[in-house]
């Protein structure tokens, strides 16, 4: 009887630990296009070739990367510059956390 209770308690503890240990991973998406509008530290609009411009907002911390994959300081982004953005969807917003220069 005691062994059954101990076994039941251990199984319950293991189940609770597994339930609490679930990790939710957030993955993002990437898109490439030409900048059609840019507001520093705020927003970016890309022409991705889909016909409609895509509006993005910047996260609080954005990583900028050059075409060789090296992290750089925030560049002066300009219209018609080709970039690849990594973004997360939050509600109805597309939030950019990484901008890669492709030129």
Image (cartoon, grey):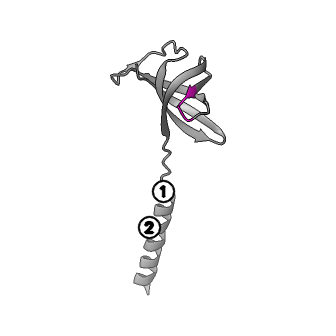
32 in relation to 19, above or below: above
- Mark 1, residues whose alpha carbon is within 10 Å: few (<14), some, or many (≥20)? few
The secondary structure making up most of the magenta span is loop
Front position among marks 2 and 1: 1
Residue at 49 percent of width and 34 percent of height: 31
The answer to the question of whether label 2 and label 1 lie on touching residues, with beta carbons closer than 8 A, is no
Residue linked to disc 1: 22
21 in relation to 59, above or below: below
Q: Residue furthest left?
A: 68
Mark 1 element type: loop
Does residue 49 show up magenta in the picture? Answer: yes
Residue at 59 percent of width and 16 percent of height: 40
Q: Residue furthest top?
A: 76
**Label of residue 14 in the image:** 2
Residue at 46 percent of width and 80 percent of height: 5
Could you tell me residue 25's position as x and y percent?
48, 48
Could you tell me residue 66's position as x and y percent?
39, 20
Give whichever of 62, 68 is nearer the camera.
Answer: 68
- Mark 2 or 1, nearer chain start: 2
Residue at 44 percent of width and 73 percent of height: 11
- The image quadrant where one finds the C terminus is top left
Q: Which residues are magenta?
A: 46-50
- Mark 2, residues whose alpha carbon is within 10 Å: few (<14), some, or many (≥20)? few
């Amino acid at each position: 009887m005691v062994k059954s209770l101990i076994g039941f308690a251990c199984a319950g503890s293991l189940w609770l630990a597994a339930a609490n240990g679930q990790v939710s991973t957030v993955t993002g998406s990437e898109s490439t296009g030409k900048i059609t509008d840019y507001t520093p530290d705020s927003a970016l609009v890309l022409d991705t070739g889909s016909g409609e411009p895509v509006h993005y907002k910047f996260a609080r911390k954005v990583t900028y990367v050059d075409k060789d994959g090296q992290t750089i300081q925030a560049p002066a982004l300009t219209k018609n510059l080709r970039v690849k953005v990594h973004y997360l969807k939050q509600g109805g917003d597309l939030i950019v956390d990484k901008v890669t220069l492709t030129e």
